[in-house]
Image: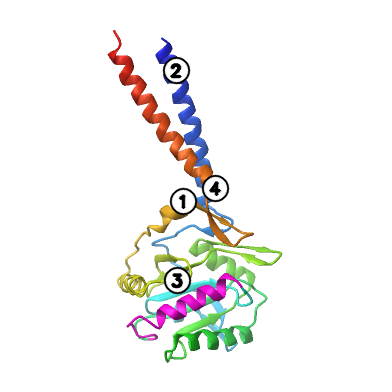
Amino acid sequence: MRLRILTVILAGLLCVILLHTHASAGQDVRSPEVGIDEHLGGTLPLDTFFTDEQGRKVLLRDLVTKPTILTFVYYRCTHTCPTLLLGLSDVLSKIDLSPGKDYSVISISFDETETPDLAGQKKKDYIKATGKAFPEGAWRFLTADRETIERITGAAGFGFKRVSTGFAHPVALIVLSPRGKITRYLYGVRFLPMDLTLALTEASKGLAVPTVNRVLLYCFSYDPEGKRYVFNILKITGIATILFAALFIGWLTRWGKKQP
């Protein structure tokens, strides 16, 4: 009798922990305020208009015609955005694929107050950092109004918010197929040439490949104040508690069956 009561109590505790963890995970992963909710296999709204670095209205469909690397940044950023774009410039200098022929790059500002003039200056800086001769249309730096920005970032699962120091936002490259299908997310600010080459090759075939970093993102939470990912000890502790409770219940059940 005591064994049954203890088993029921532990099972109830396990259910409570599972429900709490599921609710927390749903809040963090499916609709993060700041972070990335991967929309692998989803298609960006290619009928969206932007303003390019020369002040011209451009249609996204006309820009995404080959495997495309997409970055969401804001051009006035002095922290992670320059680091991301420099990391991208660096890896582009090391891959064998040709810009404008094998792939293209699009950077979109999620700050609606930024101008084409600022976008044009950033374009010169980061293309120069690649050390390569980029065709005019191979790396575009775009701006847009708030409604357009929210539409495109929402479709990509890119969550950001304005804070006192600028913006809190995740850091990643999003790789698109020639039809605007999201095929890969590459996280961080430094990238391996082999990883980017593989991602672009997959994109050329329209293959959407989940990233191992999804597991890492479940274990880490984005800290808007520190602008970095931090280890989520509560979430991992919850998982460990669930596993321990399940094992303990299993042991008690087996031990009880052995009793005369």
Residue at screen point 47% across, 83% down: 139
What distance separates the C-alpha of mark 3 from that of mark 4?
28 Å
Left or right relative to 257: residue 230: right
Labels in figure, total: 4
Q: Mark on residue 218?
A: 1
Badge 4 or badge 2: first in the primary sequence: 2
Q: Does the magenta portion include 47?
A: no
The residue wearing badge 4 is 27
Above/below status of 28 relative to 16: below
The residue wearing badge 3 is 190
Closest to the observer: 13 or 71? 13
**Quadrant of residue 98 in the image?**
bottom left
Q: Give, as a three-letter code, the residue at label 1.
A: Tyr
Badge 4 or badge 1: first in the primary sequence: 4
What distance separates the C-alpha of mark 4 from that of mark 1?
11 Å
Q: Is residue 69 visible?
A: yes
Residue at screen point 41% across, 58% down: 213
Under circle 4, the secondary element is: helix
Q: Which residues are magenta?
A: 79-100
